[in-house]
Image (cartoon, coloured by chain):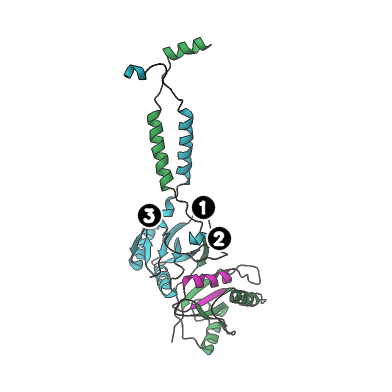
């Protein structure tokens, strides 16, 4: 039986081209994988605004993404967090990081971090304003309000 | 030629078994294909929000004083105030630019154009009387409706051509 398998009739395909192609596909998927998407809560329905444009900071600006649901709770990597304590901790960490770099930021002074607000379109202003006020109290001044610029993308 | 090739293969060629490597490569490929989820492209409106300032109850006289006094933290003399009252369902009940006639809600396409025209007239005044917009917003106004109004404001340009991007929010005290 074994001898029959190793006979001269056995097919010996050249696997090199298929391996090349598979490695090219792997390279493609590795390059397009986006770990930042994990911080976005896709269950939120963002508003649709015509003038909202994607802004590329070229990695020069540090971002803090806050997903705000209809109840005004902030969702970080899928878990609900208390806004006040979370923002205070983030601000403290940012100050420690700046201090380590040799830059001084006064307590309550402006932090060089942009807060990206991804709120559900039906979130009441009262709840959203509470999150914004907590951010401002902790020294965050730069905000980016996220929205879709096409109805089709907002639905998906 | 073929005889030479045959001889070389027999004597020195190392034949690698690529099947194992191909298996592993396919597993990696399967992982990347299964975890691939293209995220939708989101736009954003950048704002520089100053710290919150206290707000007084809204009456025409006080609103006038507010626009003229320099005591407020947001240089009130150059601030255009837009007051947005909200319905319990989150829609716009009424919208008023400074002391002008209020625009009744809901904030549909016609009202959006009306606000746009009004703001264009206000910002086109020579001497640039306003350099920032203060939105006084009702508690129940939904984020979606708020963004529509911010969208109209950020499309405006001042008399010198610079875009309006200094926008701040305060909560409207409801009686």
- For the point 49% across and 34% down, the residue is A21
Q: CA distance from mark 1 to mark 3?
A: 23 Å
Residue B166 visible in rendering: no
Q: Earlier in the sequence, mark 2 or mark 1?
A: 2
Image position of A31 with respect to B121: above or below: above
The chain ID associated with circle 1 is: A
Specify the segment rendered in magenta.
B128-155
Q: Colour of chain A?
A: cyan
Q: Are marks 2 and 1 on the same chain?
A: yes
- Answer with the quarter of the image where residue B174 lies: bottom left
Marks 1 and 3 in Cβ contact (< 8 Å): no
- For the point 38% across and 56% down, the residue is A97
Q: Earlier in the sequence, mark 1 or mark 3?
A: 1
Which disc, if any, is residue A53?
2
Query: Which quadrant does the N terminus of chain A fall into?
Result: top left
Image position of B50 with respect to B43: above or below: below
Mark nearest the camera among 2 and 3 is: 2
**Which residue is under mark 1?**
A58
Few, some or many C-alpha atoms within 10 Å of disc 3 (few <14, some 14-19, many ≥20)? few
Q: Nearer the viewer, residue B140 or B64?
A: B140
> x%, y% of residue A59?
48, 52
Image position of A77 with respect to B18: above or below: below
Chain for colour green: B
Which disc, if any, is residue A100?
3
Q: Earlier in the sequence, mark 2 or mark 3?
A: 2
């Amino acid at each position: 039986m074994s001898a029959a398998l190793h006979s001269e009739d056995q097919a010996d395909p050249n696997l090199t081209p298929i391996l090349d192609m598979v490695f090219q596909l792997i390279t493609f998927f590795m390059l397009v994988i986006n770990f930042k998407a994990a911080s976005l809560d896709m269950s939120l329905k963002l508003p649709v605004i015509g003038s909202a444009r994607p802004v590329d900071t070229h990695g020069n600006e540090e971002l803090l993404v806050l997903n705000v649901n209809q109840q005004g709770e902030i969702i970080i990597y899928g878990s609900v967090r208390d806004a006040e304590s979370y923002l205070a901790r983030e601000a403290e960490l940012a100050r420690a990081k700046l201090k380590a770099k040799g830059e001084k930021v006064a307590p309550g002074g402006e932090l060089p971090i942009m807060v990206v607000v991804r709120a559900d379109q039906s979130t009441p202003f009262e709840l959203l304003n509470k999150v914004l006020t907590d951010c401002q109290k902790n020294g965050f001044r730069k905000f980016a309000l996220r929205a879709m610029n096409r109805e089709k993308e907002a639905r998906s | 030629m073929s005889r030479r090739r045959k001889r070389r293969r027999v004597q020195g060629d190392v034949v690698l078994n690529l099947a194992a490597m191909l298996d592993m490569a396919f597993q990696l490929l399967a992982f990347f294909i299964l975890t691939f989820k293209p995220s939708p492209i989101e736009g954003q409106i950048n704002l520089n929000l100053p710290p919150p300032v206290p707000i007084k109850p809204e009456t025409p006289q006080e609103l006038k004083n507010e626009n003229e006094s320099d005591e407020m933290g947001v240089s009130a003399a150059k601030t255009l105030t837009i007051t947005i009252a909200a319905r319990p369902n989150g829609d716009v009940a009424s919208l008023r630019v400074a002391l002008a006639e209020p625009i009744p809600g809901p904030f549909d396409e016609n009202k959006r154009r009306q606000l746009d025209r009004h703001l264009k007239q206000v910002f086109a005044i020579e001497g640039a009387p306003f350099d920032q917009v203060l939105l006084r917003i009702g508690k129940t106004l939904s984020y979606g409706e708020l963004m529509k109004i911010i969208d109209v404001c950020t499309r405006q340009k001042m008399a010198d051509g610079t875009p309006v991007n200094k926008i701040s929010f305060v909560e409207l005290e409801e009686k």
